[in-house]
Amino acid sequence: MNNQSTSATELSGEPPEETRRSQLIEVTIDSLAELGYVGTTLAQIAGRAGVSPGLVAHYFGDKDGLLDAAFRSLARRVSDQVRARLRRISTPRARIQAVIDANLAPEEFEQRSGTAWLAFWGQVLQVKSLKRVQSVYQRRTLTNLRSSLKKLVPPDEAQNLAAMIAAMIDGVWLRAALSGWREADSESARALLTEFVDGRLAASRAASDKNLGAAGTSDAAETRARPAPPAAGERFASINPATGEVLGYHSVAGPAQVNAAVRAAQCAQVKWAAMTGAERARVLRRAAQLLRSRNQELAELETRDTGKPIQETSVVDVVSGADCFEYFASLAQSLSGEHIDLGSQAFGYTRREPLGVVAGIGAWNYPLQIACWKAAPALACGNAMIFKPAELTPFSAVKLQEILLEAGLPPGVFQVVQGFAETGRLLTRHPGIRKVSLTGEVGTGKAVMSDAARTLKSVTLELGGKSPLIIFDDAKLDNAVAGALLANFYSSGQVCSNATRVFVHASVKAAFLERLLKRVSAMRVGDPMDPTTQVGALISEQHMHKVLGYIARGRAAGARLLIGGDRVTTGNLGKGYFVAPTIFDACRDDMAIVREEIFGPVMSVLEFTDEREVIERANATEFGLAAGVFTNDLTRGHRVIAQLQAGTCWINHYNVTPIELPFGGVKMSGLGRENGRAALEHYTQLKSVYVALGDVDAPY
Ligand code: NDP
């Protein structure tokens, strides 16, 4: 070969033999797509490629050799895709999704390669070499699925579920191929699998919780029911959900790290609690100042980690955290007990004392705000806190730790441990920790409460919701539309208190929808770092598929899609996980999109005519986090709010959360309150002291 040549082959870096082989394989796939297995012969391939049959035989031997190579090439393409996706992802559920997504990718739902796959499947039982390729491909899929599932469900269940998922992947693909790609496309096939997997995992978790309850708290029962924890020290990647880029790696904290953190916190807490309220307040106030002075830097970090628009993080997340430290700094100075008059011979008093070492476990939607909302009251009351952020958003809690140290907090009083659910459980079960405050899903809340019961820890649980917003016919309509937007689309809809069930009085619904659609169609979905972007990315690919799955279910159940409904992939957005703001009309109370928490930008509009009827429908949910009412009749506003089963309510506004007002849910949405003076109750314990003023008389 001429070394000076700059042929395409050299530029591609492949030796010419390999290139020729690849070309012949591509021609074979074309032929299979057109003529099927029987019609594809060496002579046919040679004719199509413009080479002699001898040359084809030189490379592949006979027809079986050629088809074997072509089948391997198709299977390798899927394996490469799986590997590439798995390299970017570390959480078990997202890894399962990666296997599903690679197998059901758009390029596998396309006429040419799809028909070639079909031709191969038809021969697998007869041709040994094809059978071998198919077995390896199947084994790899099962191994990938099983290894992730084992971290989520007990081992025997992982085995069965992996087989079911693999069978469903093959099944939906085969049905789609046999229907000429009319029965399903790549997206709906993936949505179906996502829904199936989420459903099975939820069922497994529920069964596991039930087993745990039934079997008491015996270690043996739990080992059977719970998945094995991820290895301590294992690294996990953190991904920018807007770009798919890896932002950094973190190590999972295991028992050794958690024990060390608890020991350090126990020592530090004694000194911190011994300081006066005024001294503690000074540190917390300085932390608030530092948070404000670093607003932009922290907002950018939060935007990269969560995919939320900088437009939001720069005015909400950090500011709310700083407000919280300021508020609880003031309360640190006014913590007090009670004096109780017991007559001339005695009096009593109560001391409001810290609990000791407490744990905070955060969700991924407001990582810094959640860390601040938990740390500020805990520290104000003289506790030490060990905080575990959600593994999807590990960065800002570490920044908060740095800021608190810089503000003068003694080392050890606020510490961050990273990891998955298992690290959270190490905290929840630790005998040295006196309380856990969790923000997360209802299922996690139940698991935390049951784990905390072993050592009688108190818990604050800020859990999920499916809140109602009721718009009466006398409401100022523009305000109601603004309220519905605030209630649905902040953080791409990933807000626990969102009112995704919007009940609108029949007489104003048409006008309401017209104004709503005008504003939603003008919303900008885009790069979260761009200050003009109003809707950013969802937290992860897996979560995006969950949201798209709900949208597909809404459509299938007969809700009328008014706007949105799709993933947004324009420009560079295809690298991230963006979903357009979506509104469904003509919803019924029994639809999954109306009953279940979607945690995405999906609003369901429901019609009502009668006050009593709408209150009943609004309350017909297991959740009770928040609720809102828009009306110009103040008497009705208060009357309706008093009857709604929700912990946090708004009249003529939505989703504003001043630190002074307690925040939290009722029913399955949680226990306890964050913010306001109410939070002090959850981070202190009362000591009652009887003081005798006279002599002591004993009857013995
Ligand atoms: P999850 O419940 O999945 O996770 C919450 C946190 O708990 C994470 O740090 C998680 O770790 C950890 N965790 C999971 N399992 C356990 C366990 N058994 N023991 C101890 N810790 C555990 O919630 P998301 O992060 O998905 O957040 C979304 C949910 O949070 C939604 O339901 C939303 O409504 C709710 N939420 C509620 C709010 C409220 O104030 N009421 C506010 C914001 C969100 P890891 O992620 O590393 O697995």
Image (cartoon, rainbow, N blue to C red):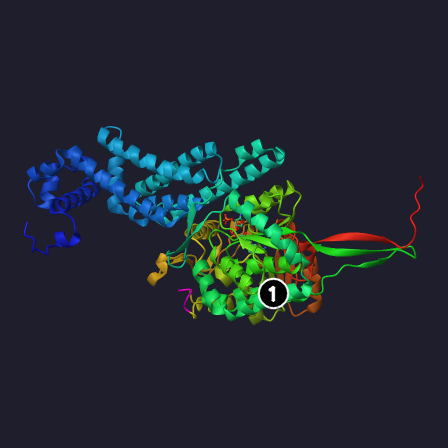
The quadrant of the image that shows the C terminus is top right
Which residues are the magenta region? Answer: 526-530
The magenta stretch spans residue 292 = no
Q: In the figure, residue 212 lies in which quadrant? A: top right
Q: In screen coordinates, is 301 left or right of 658?
A: left
* Of the pair 197 and 112, the residue shown nearer to us: 197
Q: In screen coordinates, is 445 left or right of 536?
A: right
Q: Tell me residue 238's x, y (percent).
A: 42, 53
Q: Report the magenta stretch's main SS.
A: loop
Q: Tell me residue 426's x, y (percent).
A: 55, 44
Q: In screen coordinates, is 458 left or right of 697?
A: left
* Of the pair 32 and 104, the residue shown nearer to us: 104
Q: Which residue sits at x=92%, y=51%? A: 695
Q: Which residue sits at x=50%, y=52%? A: 390
Q: Which residue sits at x=31%, y=46%? A: 81
The residue pinned by badge 1 equals 283
Query: Circle 1: is it few (<14), some (14-19), or many (20+) Cα within 10 Å?
Result: many
Q: In this rendering, is residue 16 above or below 378?
A: above
* Of the pair 679 and 94, the residue shown nearer to us: 679
The magenta stretch spans residue 527 = yes
Q: In the figure, residue 60 lies in which quadrant? A: top left
Mark 1: amino acid: Val
Q: In this rendering, is residue 172 above or below 586?
A: above
* Of the pair 318 and 642, the residue shown nearer to us: 318
Q: Is mark 1 within 8 Å of ligand 1?
A: no
Q: Is residue 151 visible?
A: yes
SS label for mark 1? helix
